[in-house]
Image: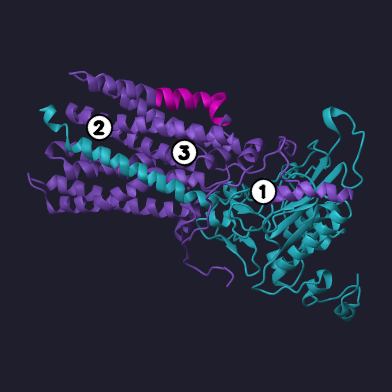
């Protein structure tokens, strides 16, 4: 009789949530001696720097391609700088990634299989293909540029062809890293997969436009700079919106504390938001409204964007790793089963033998 | 408990050969490739002896770590990691506000002990994250890291929803429980399960274990221990968010968080698609904006 009374309310609850007693009872913040429940990623500043460099390189290739297809001879500096930035990004980024491996001599094992469930796997292919296409483009551009006498040499035409796949891969380079972070159990990263992807993508485009704008200022093409500043401002505004959405998701899931408080929160707010978004938006807005745009404001805005993009990546990496060490963050995030998580087809192609059960 | 009839064939105290299908004699399970095997860890039977930890370290040749006292009850192991593949958690319920509890439940009252281990998830996030194919699913439906392929990228570490996998800085590879892959191949019961003196850790065919565990829960409920529930069996906490079920599952008597387990873990790879597609959509929008800026506003300049 006593048992019956105890069990009845339990069974009703089970029907509602499909989770049996006593797991349905409210979680009162219990943890196991405050010990971490998941492990933080071993990714350090090098991977965060790669995310920044990869995004900048990918988006620079997109801008260069657009300038080549839609622009005229006045856009030559943008095209050249964009193509070289893309190659430079891979040349700097790939070693950063390899350096972060704990067994770097086996880096080539990254291309041993192809797996859509792992952004680290398909990202390696994006990086490899982007590097190859961008490398070909830059080399052909360099040769074609030297030999060009007015018209476009065959080499230059080859560069114009290889840049198209490079630009498409550039879109992947700009944003796959957000998917990589989201597809973990790290509370901060797992809580806002979509908003973080938009944040990374917009920041990539903003920093690429800022870098190219600086190049135009150095070359003395204020007119080109102005258009690129406009693009940077649009992307930065988008990033501001994406950041707000990410912040909203963090609050809903109760995980954002590591990105709000302490030195990381401070650097995120002042470095990534105030300096990285506020300053360039103000600078570029003043320039856009004035009849005679100021060179100094344009350069200041570009430099602020470039610095802010890096601070944003580093802060998100550090805050994410820190959130993994906080069991209450993880337990808050995992209180509810996420809606709409349906099984999907995954391509998992083994190059070697694979031990899946028949 | 009856003795397996085949046990009489090996009566000598020190047999000088390996007993074929020894697992049949020690746990009543014949190990055959193509079937799913796992652990059922019944925490109501655990006495916290840590024989599983020792057996695991011995068999797998794992170095000592976490030397020193943690101050967390009798748990001086800390957590699962590269060199610790079984970890006995100790939960002492002393009472609220530092006062000694005045009343106690008759069963599983103030002491909770649980031998934690890699869950060998049916949809393992570490395996799905591994970019090298180093982590693979064996013919026994377990999840193992191949040390000769792992390049130490470390992506499996944050992917795991239970904080099991860890990189060893000694050799730069990821390590975790293999569910004694080598022993299974040789027809031996995994070391921890064989060493467990109370059968808190039970090794067997996974469907048989689910059945056995379900009966155990019913049994405990009948005896009045209505707190008992399964964690990681199909449609229970721990088997949420696309993980389907855990090949190493548990019988718990308090909230999962008390044992450092999430109540509703998720399958990390479910977030790849929404994130990547949103990112690409943002890039498409930005490209359109860039195209508009590139093709207009030129006249104003000159």
Q: Chain of mark 3?
A: A
Any mark on residue A16, and which? 1
Label 1 SS? helix
State if disc 1 and disc 3 touch (CB < 8 Å).
no
Comparing labels 3 and 1, the label whose residue is closer to the camera: 1
Residue B71 picture quarter: top right
Any mark on residue A48, and which? 3
Q: Chain of mark 2?
A: A
Q: Residue at x 24, y 23 (%)?
A: A288
Relative to B98, A330 lies left or right: left
Q: Which residue is mark 2?
A: A228
Residue B261: x and y in percent read 70, 46
State if disc 2 and disc 1 touch (CB < 8 Å).
no
Look at the image and tell me whether residue B39 can be seen: yes
Q: Are marks 3 and 1 on the same chain?
A: yes
Q: Earlier in the sequence, mark 3 or mark 2?
A: 3
Q: Earlier in the sequence, mark 3 or mark 1?
A: 1
Q: Which chain is purple?
A: A
- Whether B271 is among the magenta residues is no
Q: Which hue is chain B drawn in?
A: cyan
The answer for how far apart the CA atoms under marks 3 and 1 are is 42 Å
Relative to B133, B37 lies left or right: right
- Whether A259 is among the magenta residues is yes
């Amino acid at each position: 009789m006593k048992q019956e009374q105890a069990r009845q309310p339990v069974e009703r609850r089970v029907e509602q949530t499909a989770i049996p007693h006593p797991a349905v009872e409210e979680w009162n913040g219990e943890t196991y001696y405050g010990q971490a429940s998941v492990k933080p990623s071993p990714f350090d500043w090098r991977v965060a720097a790669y995310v920044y460099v990869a995004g900048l390189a990918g988006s620079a290739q997109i801008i260069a391609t657009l300038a080549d297809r839609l622009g005229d001879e006045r856009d030559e500096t943008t095209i050249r700088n964009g193509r070289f930035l893309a190659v430079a990004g891979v040349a700097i980024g790939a070693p950063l990634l390899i350096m972060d491996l704990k067994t770097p001599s086996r880096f080539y094992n990254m291309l041993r299989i192809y797996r859509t469930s792992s952004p680290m796997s398909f990202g390696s292919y994006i990086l490899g293909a982007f590097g190859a296409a961008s490398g070909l483009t830059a080399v052909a551009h360099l040769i074609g540029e030297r030999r060009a006498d007015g018209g476009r040499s065959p080499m230059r035409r080859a560069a114009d062809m290889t840049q198209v796949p490079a630009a498409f891969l550039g879109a992947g380079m700009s944003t796959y890293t957000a998917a990589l972070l989201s597809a973990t159990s790290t509370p901060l990263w797992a809580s806002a997969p979509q908003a973080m992807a938009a944040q990374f993508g917009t920041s990539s485009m903003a920093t690429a436009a800022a870098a190219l704008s600086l190049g135009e200022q150095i070359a003395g093409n204020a007119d080109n700079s102005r258009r690129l500043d406009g693009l940077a401002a649009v992307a930065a505004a988008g990033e501001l919106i994406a950041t707000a959405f990410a912040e909203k998701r963090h609050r809903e899931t109760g995980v954002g504390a590591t990105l709000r408080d302490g030195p990381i929160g401070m650097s995120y707010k002042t470095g990534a938001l105030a300096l990285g978004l506020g300053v360039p938006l103000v600078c570029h807005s003043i320039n856009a409204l004035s009849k005679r745009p100021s060179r100094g404001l344009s350069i200041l805005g570009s430099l602020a964007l470039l610095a802010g993009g890096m601070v944003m990546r580093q802060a998100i990496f550090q805050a994410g790793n820190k959130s993994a060490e906080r069991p209450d963050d993880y337990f808050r995030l995992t209180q509810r089963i996420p809606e709409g998580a349906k099984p999907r087809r995954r391509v998992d192609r083994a190059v070697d033998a694979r031990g899946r059960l028949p | 408990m009856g003795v397996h009839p085949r046990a009489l064939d090996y009566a000598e105290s020190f047999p000088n050969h390996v007993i074929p299908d020894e697992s049949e004699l020690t746990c009543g399970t014949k190990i055959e490739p193509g079937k799913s095997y796992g652990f059922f860890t019944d925490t109501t039977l655990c006495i916290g002896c840590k024989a599983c930890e020792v057996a695991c370290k011995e068999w797998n040749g794992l170095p000592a770590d976490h030397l020193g006292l943690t101050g967390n009850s009798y748990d001086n192991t800390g957590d699962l990691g590269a060199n610790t593949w079984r970890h006995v958690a100790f939960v002492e319920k002393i009472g609220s506000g530092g006062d000694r509890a005045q009343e106690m439940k008759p069963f599983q009252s103030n002491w909770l002990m649980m031998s934690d281990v890699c869950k060998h998830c049916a949809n393992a996030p570490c395996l799905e994250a591994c970019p090298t194919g180093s982590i693979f699913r064996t013919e026994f439906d377990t999840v193992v890291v191949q040390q000769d392929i792992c390049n130490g990228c470390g992506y499996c570490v944050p992917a795991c929803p239970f904080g099991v996998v860890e990189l060893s800085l000694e050799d730069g590879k990821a390590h975790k429980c293999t569910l004694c892959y080598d022993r299974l191949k040789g027809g031996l019961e995994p070391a921890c399960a064989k060493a467990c003196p109370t059968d808190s850790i039970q090794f067997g065919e996974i469907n048989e274990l689910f059945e056995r565990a379900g009966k155990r829960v019913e049994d405990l409920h009948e005896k009045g221990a209505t707190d008992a529930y399964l964690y990681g069996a199909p449609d229970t906490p721990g088997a949420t968010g696309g993980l389907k079920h855990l090949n190493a599952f548990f019988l718990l008597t308090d909230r999962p968080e008390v044992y450092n387990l999430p109540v509703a873990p998720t399958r990390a790879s479910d977030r790849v698609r929404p994130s990547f597609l949103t990112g690409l959509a943002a890039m498409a929008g930005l490209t359109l904006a860039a195209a508009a800026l590139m093709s207009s506003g030129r006249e104003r300049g000159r």
